[in-house]
Amino acid sequence: MQRADGVMRATRTKRRCAVIGAGVLVGALAACASPAPSVSSDEALDTYASVLDDIESALVEEYPTVAWASDGDTSVQRSDDDDPCTVFFPTIETRTSLWAAAGGDWDEIAAVIDPVLADYGFPGITADEDVAGGWLVYRAQDDDGAMLRIDDKDSSSISLSIDVTDADCPTP
């Protein structure tokens, strides 16, 4: 009898650990998700319109040989009827690897970009470790869900987007 209780107790303990582990995993994944939209597209345009311009200016000052170009226009769109509207700001791009221009040192790049991000209420950039194909990806997300993303391989691009509260996706 004692043996059966011991086996049953061990089995229950394993199940509890599995349930607790699953709960921790779900909580961690939820923490990585974007927050619910909290600003309108007008507020997003007012707040974030100059973020990429200011980052580009800081990068040009630090790395004058790296030429940047803006790709596209600001747009507000949704990918699915169930998704919120998202403001996409024009991506800035260079044919040069920013990482290579910084001598392979992301800390040096962060030292240039993070102060600009802080002016807009963003935390510093962090590495996205889950990227295939040799790409280096760094991100920063503010409390309203605005996401700055830096993609680098042989070239670099920096994009900014934010989900907004608008029911319809207006043209900016």
Image (tube, rainbow, N blue to C red):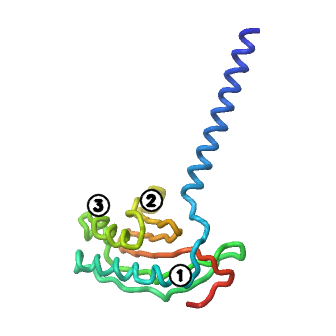
Residue that appears at 39% across and 79% down: 52
- Residue identifier under label 3: 107
Among the 4 quarters of the image, the one containing residue 151: bottom left
Q: Is residue 113 left or right of residue 49?
A: left
Q: Give how far apart the Cα atoms at labels 2 and 1 are.
A: 28 Å
Q: Quadrant of the C terminus?
A: bottom right
Residue that appears at 45% across and 59% down: 128
If you read the primary sequence from the N terminus, does the residue marked by circle 3 or circle 2 appear first?
3
- Residue identifier under label 2: 128
Task: Name, please, the residue furthest toward the right.
Answer: 1
Q: Is residue 103 above or below residue 87?
A: above
What secondary structure is found at the residue carrying circle 2?
loop
Q: Is residue 103 left or right of residue 5?
A: left
Circle 1: residue type: Glu
Q: Is residue 140 above or below residue 60?
A: above
Image position, residue 11 (x, y; %): 70, 25
Q: Give how far apart the Cα atoms at labels 3 and 1 are.
A: 31 Å
Q: Answer whether labels 2 and 1 touch (C-beta < 8 Å).
A: no
Q: Quadrant of the N terminus?
A: top right
Q: Residues within 10 Å of mark 3 (few under 14, many from 20)?
A: some
Circle 2: residue type: Asp
Circle 3: residue type: Asp
What secondary structure is found at the residue carrying circle 3?
helix
- Residue identifier under label 1: 43
If you read the primary sequence from the N terminus, does the residue marked by circle 2 or circle 1 appear first?
1
Q: Nearer the viewer, mark 2 or mark 1?
A: 1
